[in-house]
Amino acid sequence: MASKNRVENVAIVGAGGNMGSYIVEALLKEGKHKVTAITRPDSSSRMPEGVIVKKVNYDNQDELVDVLRGQDALLVTMNNMAPPEQQVRLVEAAATANVRWIMPNLWGIDGKNESLLKDILVSDRVMPVLRRIEELGKSSWIGLTCGFWYEWSLGGGAIGMGEVMYGFDLKNRTVTFIDDGNTKINTSTWPQSGLATARLLALKENPDGPDDKSPTISQFKSDFVCVSSFLVSQRDMLESVLRVTGTKESDWKADHADHQERYNDGVKELQAGERAGFAKLLYTRTFFPNGDGNYAAKYGLHNDILGLPEEDLDEFTKVTFKYAGVPL
């Protein structure tokens, strides 16, 4: 056990990305950690004041080890399609540098659901990394299950892929309901996910003694922290969209798609080299009417342990329109 019993030094890979930037923002606001952003030498990402920037060649293991020495935790927020070996090199360097905690590139999805991981084609990317951390035996991993990010997925962001995500085309006012549109899933906002990460790392690492029942990081060792902003269906989302836009349901064109057919279409599109196919199969699989998207019902949530605030669905629906570049 570390004598200080606290995580103080946090290194993050991908600090300039969507998830990474919100984690950094929350860590700085909470003010309990020294934050180091590990970036490539040619990275153009600008870090906020208070973040230490270390540029490193990811292919040079000695450099990775050097930059990770003295770090208590490593957070990896990379593109989901990044080669698994990149993350393996990072966790191997973390083990050599005696980094105690790793939050690997496993953000959002229910990492306990093996059939789901297999169906969304990420099992072969995720499991080897977790196994390697455990084999090395120097670090412990923790995953964050938070569902898809609501304000990105509802409108598809700047890339305009909302229809293959939560089924909405905000610009053209169309929605494709998967089955009847009533399947509820857990979904979270970026700020809530970032805050959950910061609050987790602010916990004590281990109990102070046998009678200490307060939350600790170690209770999540080799497991997942589960948080959620909202438990909603596509129809709930549409109701929120109608409220913030002042439109009526008759102003929108609605279609329906069978969950299995839509998932199969996504697989075929991906096999044909269409990027949108992966998003379609990924999101559609979560809306299967078997409860897989409602992880809160299976495991419960850790929102209270982490002191996470209640959020307003309509406020983040408004944010969605901003991200998508669609005026209200």
Image (cartoon, rainbow, N blue to C red):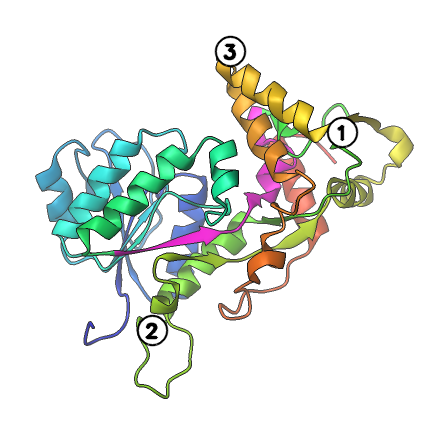
Q: Which residue is mark 2?
A: 204
How many tags in the picture? 3
Between label 3 and label 2, give the one nearer the viewer.
Answer: 3
Q: Is residue 193 left or right of residue 228?
A: left
Was residue 109 drawn as part of the magenta stretch in this picture? no
Q: Residues within 10 Å of mark 2 (few under 14, many from 20)?
A: some
As rendered, which of 72 and 247 lies closer to the eye?
A: 72
Q: Earlier in the sequence, mark 3 or mark 2?
A: 2
The residue that appears at 43% across and 34% down in the rendered structure is 122
Q: Which residue is mark 1?
A: 175
Q: CA distance from mark 2 to mark 1?
A: 45 Å
Q: Is residue 18 left or right of residue 135?
A: right
The residue that appears at 70% across and 47% down in the rendered structure is 184
Magenta-tinted stretch: 140-159
Q: Residue furthest front?
A: 115
Q: Residues within 10 Å of mark 1 (few under 14, many from 20)?
A: many
Q: Position of residue 291 (x, y in %)?
A: 65, 47
Q: Which residue is mark 3?
A: 272
Q: Position of residue 109 (x, y in %)?
A: 50, 44
Instruction: Kindly tell me whether residue 45 is visible in this rendering.
Output: yes
Q: Residues within 10 Å of mark 3 (few under 14, many from 20)?
A: few
As rendered, which of 278 and 64 lies closer to the eye?
A: 278
Q: Residue furthest bottom?
A: 211
Q: Note whether 51 is above or below 249 in the view shown.
A: below
* Quarter of the image where the N terminus is located: bottom left
Q: Amino acid at mark 3?
A: Ala
Instruction: Kindly tell me whether residue 169 is visible in this rendering.
Output: no
